[in-house]
Amino acid sequence: MSSWAGNIQMDSCPEIAPFFGFMGVSSALVLANMGAAYGTAKSGIGIASMGVMSPGMVMRNIIPVVMAGVLGIYGLIVAVILQGSIVAPVNGVGTYSLYSGFAHMCAGMCCGFSGLGAGMAIGIVGDAGVRAVGQQEKLFVGLILVLIFAEALGLYGLIVALILSQNSYVC
């Protein structure tokens, strides 16, 4: 009877399980930062181009860069939360379950890919938007609204990742 219970313990809590949790940590941080970097670079190109025509509007149009940078913070938040939940094996016996590992990996991927997509949207909209605002200032409010909706995509990923990070199974 006790060996059967021990087999269940080993099957649901193998030593490899923390690998999946750490993959979630790295996915959240790396993918969200890739989105932030793309959004910053792409909208930065638009700001530089617009700044040649209207140098006085550069600081006003820096908003896409700030919004892209926030996506990296989302990834950092999720990575720190997930990392704090990962438990190392004790005396060769796993105490972190596959269930927890998979939940944390999915949380990291959810935040990371949402941040990547939001960063791409912010970059493309920011690039075209700041160039357009440089020529017609009345487009500024519309640009900000589109950027808010693009940022919301990353925020949705953060929220779902936080919910998923709370799923765990204790061995």
Image (tube, rainbow, N blue to C red):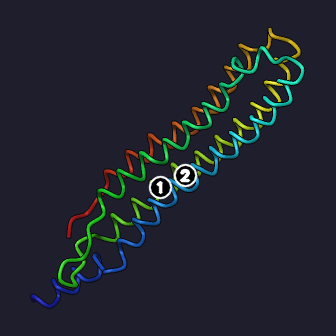
Residue 155 x, y percent position in the rendering: 52, 36
Residue 119 x, y percent position in the rendering: 66, 42
Instruction: Please tell me which residue is depicted at 35% across the width and 50% down the height of the picture.
Output: 81
The part of the image, by quadrant, that contains residue 137 is top right
Left/right placement of residue 100 relative to residue 22 reads: left
Instruction: Please tell me which residue is depicted at 69% across the width and 17% down the height of the picture.
Output: 60
Q: Residues within 10 Å of mark 2 (few under 14, many from 20)?
A: many
| Dot 1 amino acid type | Gly
- The answer to whether marks 2 and 1 mark residues whose Cβ atoms lie closer than 8 Å is yes
Q: Which residue corresponds to mark 2?
A: 112
Q: Nearer the viewer, residue 169 or 60?
A: 60
SS for dot 1: helix
Instruction: State the CA–CA distance, disc 2 to disc 1.
Output: 6 Å
Q: Which residue corresponds to mark 1?
A: 108
SS for dot 2: helix
Left/right placement of residue 63 relative to residue 48 reads: left
Residue 71 x, y percent position in the rendering: 56, 40
Quadrant that contains the C terminus: bottom left
Residue 116 x, y percent position in the rendering: 63, 48
Q: Residues within 10 Å of mark 1 (few under 14, many from 20)?
A: many
Left/right placement of residue 126 relative to residue 111 reads: right
Instruction: Please tell me which residue is depicted at 29% across the width and 82% down the height of the picture.
Output: 11
Instruction: Please tell me which residue is depicted at 23% across the width and 81% down the height of the picture.
Output: 8
Quadrant that contains the N terminus: bottom left
| Dot 2 amino acid type | Gly
